[in-house]
Protein backbone atom coordinates (compact mmCIF):
# COMPACT_ATOMS: atom_id res chain seq x y z
CA UNK A 1 0.00 0.00 0.00
CA UNK A 2 2.82 2.39 0.84
CA UNK A 3 4.50 1.56 -2.47
CA UNK A 4 1.29 2.35 -4.34
CA UNK A 5 1.01 5.71 -2.55
CA UNK A 6 4.65 6.53 -3.33
CA UNK A 7 4.19 5.57 -7.00
CA UNK A 8 1.02 7.70 -7.23
CA UNK A 9 2.75 10.69 -5.64
CA UNK A 10 5.73 10.42 -8.02
CA UNK A 11 3.42 10.08 -11.03
CA UNK A 12 1.37 13.10 -9.93
CA UNK A 13 4.56 15.09 -9.41
CA UNK A 14 5.85 14.19 -12.90
CA UNK A 15 2.52 15.02 -14.51
CA UNK A 16 2.41 18.33 -12.64
CA UNK A 17 5.96 19.16 -13.70
CA UNK A 18 5.16 18.24 -17.31
CA UNK A 19 2.07 20.44 -17.25
CA UNK A 20 4.08 23.28 -15.74
CA UNK A 21 6.74 22.90 -18.46
CA UNK A 22 4.06 23.16 -21.15
CA UNK A 23 2.58 26.27 -19.56
CA UNK A 24 5.97 27.96 -19.26
CA UNK A 25 6.90 27.01 -22.84
CA UNK A 26 3.61 28.39 -24.11
CA UNK A 27 3.89 31.60 -22.07
CA UNK A 28 7.39 32.37 -23.34
CA UNK A 29 7.01 30.96 -26.85
CA UNK A 30 8.09 33.15 -29.73
CA UNK A 31 5.75 32.74 -32.68
CA UNK A 32 7.06 31.18 -35.87
CA UNK A 33 6.13 32.82 -39.17
CA UNK A 34 6.30 31.16 -42.59
CA UNK A 35 7.10 33.24 -45.68
CA UNK A 36 5.60 31.50 -48.72
CA UNK A 37 6.68 32.89 -52.07
CA UNK A 38 4.25 32.88 -55.00
CA UNK A 39 5.38 34.09 -58.41
CA UNK A 40 3.54 31.84 -60.82
CA UNK A 41 4.79 28.92 -58.71
CA UNK A 42 4.09 28.25 -55.06
CA UNK A 43 7.32 28.03 -53.06
CA UNK A 44 6.33 27.13 -49.50
CA UNK A 45 8.54 27.97 -46.55
CA UNK A 46 8.85 24.75 -44.56
CA UNK A 47 11.14 26.13 -41.84
CA UNK A 48 9.82 29.56 -40.92
CA UNK A 49 11.42 32.16 -38.70
CA UNK A 50 10.68 33.21 -35.14
CA UNK A 51 9.81 36.84 -34.38
CA UNK A 52 8.42 38.31 -31.18
CA UNK A 53 5.74 40.32 -33.00
CA UNK A 54 3.66 40.55 -36.15
CA UNK A 55 5.22 43.94 -36.90
CA UNK A 56 8.68 42.37 -37.06
CA UNK A 57 7.36 39.63 -39.34
CA UNK A 58 5.94 42.33 -41.65
CA UNK A 59 9.33 44.04 -41.78
CA UNK A 60 10.98 40.69 -42.60
CA UNK A 61 8.45 40.07 -45.40
CA UNK A 62 9.34 43.40 -47.04
CA UNK A 63 13.08 42.75 -46.67
CA UNK A 64 12.69 39.20 -48.03
CA UNK A 65 10.71 40.45 -51.04
CA UNK A 66 13.41 43.07 -51.65
CA UNK A 67 16.14 40.42 -51.62
CA UNK A 68 14.23 38.18 -54.03
CA UNK A 69 13.56 41.08 -56.39
CA UNK A 70 17.17 42.24 -56.16
CA UNK A 71 18.33 38.84 -57.44
CA UNK A 72 15.37 38.16 -59.76
CA UNK A 73 14.04 41.55 -60.92
CA UNK A 74 12.24 40.07 -63.93
CA UNK A 75 9.84 38.13 -61.71
CA UNK A 76 7.37 41.04 -61.57
CA UNK A 77 7.30 41.40 -65.38
CA UNK A 78 6.37 37.79 -66.16
CA UNK A 79 2.59 38.35 -66.06
CA UNK A 80 2.05 36.97 -62.55
CA UNK A 81 1.80 38.82 -59.27
CA UNK A 82 4.73 38.38 -56.94
CA UNK A 83 3.44 37.58 -53.47
CA UNK A 84 4.79 36.76 -50.06
CA UNK A 85 2.03 35.10 -48.05
CA UNK A 86 2.88 34.95 -44.36
CA UNK A 87 1.25 32.26 -42.24
CA UNK A 88 1.52 31.10 -38.67
CA UNK A 89 2.38 27.61 -37.40
CA UNK A 90 -1.20 26.47 -38.12
CA UNK A 91 -0.95 27.74 -41.72
CA UNK A 92 -3.39 30.55 -40.96
CA UNK A 93 -2.79 33.39 -43.43
CA UNK A 94 -1.77 36.48 -41.47
CA UNK A 95 -1.02 38.91 -44.31
CA UNK A 96 0.07 39.08 -47.94
CA UNK A 97 2.66 41.34 -49.52
CA UNK A 98 1.98 41.85 -53.26
CA UNK A 99 4.35 43.45 -55.78
CA UNK A 100 3.06 44.15 -59.28
CA UNK A 101 4.85 45.79 -62.19
CA UNK A 102 2.61 47.82 -64.50
CA UNK A 103 3.83 49.53 -67.68
CA UNK A 104 2.26 52.85 -68.59
CA UNK A 105 -0.28 52.55 -71.46
CA UNK A 106 1.83 54.85 -73.69
CA UNK A 107 4.71 52.36 -73.65
CA UNK A 108 2.69 49.80 -75.61
CA UNK A 109 4.13 47.10 -73.33
CA UNK A 110 1.42 46.62 -70.70
CA UNK A 111 2.04 43.37 -68.87
CA UNK A 112 -0.65 43.83 -66.23
CA UNK A 113 -3.28 41.14 -66.75
CA UNK A 114 -6.05 43.39 -65.46
CA UNK A 115 -5.26 46.14 -67.99
CA UNK A 116 -4.56 43.85 -70.91
CA UNK A 117 -2.33 44.77 -73.87
CA UNK A 118 -2.04 48.47 -74.59
CA UNK A 119 -3.51 49.78 -77.80
Image (tube, grey):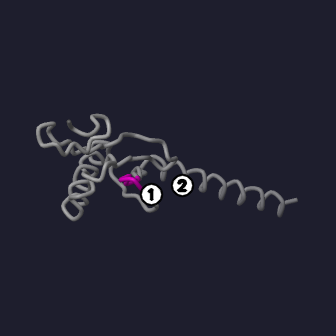
**Residue plotted at (32% across, 46% down):** 81
**Residue plotted at (55% across, 51% down):** 20
Closer-to-camera residue (81/53)? 81
Q: Picture coordinates of residue 111 (x, y %)?
A: 25, 45
Element carrying mark 1: loop
Q: Picture coordinates of residue 16 (x, y %)?
A: 63, 52
**Mark 2 crowd level (few <14, some 14–19, many ≥20, 10 Å Cα):** few
Magenta residue check for 52 = no
Q: What residue is disc 2 on?
A: 21
Stretch of the chain drawn in magenta = 34-45
Residue 10's quadrant in the figure?
A: bottom right
Q: Quadrant of the C terminus?
A: top left
Q: Is residue 50 above or below residue 116?
A: below
Which mark sits nearer the N-terminus, 2 or 1? 2
**Front tag of 2 and 1:** 1
Closer-to-camera residue (11/96)? 96
Closer-to-camera residue (82/21)? 82
Report the Cα–Cα distance between label 2 and label 1. 31 Å
Q: Quadrant of the N terminus?
A: bottom right
Query: Is any part of residue 34 visible from this angle?
Result: yes
Q: What residue is disc 1 on?
A: 44
Q: Is residue 83 above or below residue 7?
A: above
Closer-to-camera residue (1/46)? 46
Q: Picture coordinates of residue 71 (x, y %)?
A: 21, 65
Element carrying mark 2: helix
Amino acid sequence: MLLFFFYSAVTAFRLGALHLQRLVRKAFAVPRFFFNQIDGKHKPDDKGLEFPSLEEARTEAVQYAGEVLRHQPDVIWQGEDFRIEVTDENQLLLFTLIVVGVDAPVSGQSTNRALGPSA
